[in-house]
Amino acid sequence: MLGNKASIKNGAKSVIGIEDREKSVDLANKNMDFYKISKEKYQFVVGDVTDGMIKFPPKKFDTFLFWNIISSCRSLAFFIKYKKN
C-alpha cells in the first residue's frame, strides 16, 4: 500500500492496486487519504491479480509492483499472456 503512495510521490500518473481482501482495499484508501493523495490518482479493487489485470486494456501499465507475488498470482504464465496484449 505504501508502495502506491511512493509511486505517486515519485512521478507515477496513477496507480491501481489489486488487493485480495476488502479490508486491504479499505486500509489502502485510508492511507492515501491520510497522505492527501488525490482520489483521481489511485484506484483499489478486490480480486486476484491474475484475473484483475487482464480486465484492464493492453498497454495500461508501464510498471508492475508486486508484494507477496507468490500468494497473489496463480501462474506466472499470466505475464506472458498480458505482455502479448
Image (tube, grey):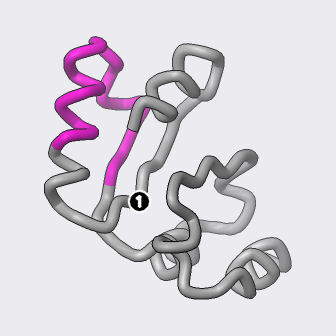
Q: Is residue 66 left or right of residue 30?
A: right
Q: Dominant secondary structure of the magenta stretch?
A: helix
Q: Is residue 77 left or right of residue 3?
A: right
- Image mark count: 1
Judge whether residue 45 is colored magenta.
no
Q: Residue at x 17, y 60 (%)?
A: 22
Q: Nearer the viewer, residue 71 or 20?
A: 71
**Amino acid at pointer 1:** Ile
- Mark 1 neighbour density, 10 Å: few (under 14) some (14–19) many (20 or more): many
Q: Position of residue 78 (x, y in %)?
A: 68, 82
Q: Residue at x 25, y 27 (%)?
A: 31
Residue under the point 27% across and 39% down = 28
The magenta segment = 27-44
Question: Which percent across, then down, holds residue 63?
Answer: 71, 46
Name the spot of residue 3 as percent of width and height, x first: 51, 33
Residue 21: quarter of image: bottom left
Q: Secondary structure at mark 1?
A: strand
User: Residue 5, located in which quarter of the rendered image?
Assistant: top left
Which residue corresponds to the image point at 22% horizontal and 22% vertical from the top-left?
Answer: 33
Q: Position of residue 51 (x, y in %)?
A: 48, 81
Q: Does the magenta segment cover residue 41?
A: yes
Q: Circle 1 sits on which residue?
A: 18
Front residue of 68 and 2:
68
Vertical arrangement, residue 25 with respect to residue 20, above or below: above
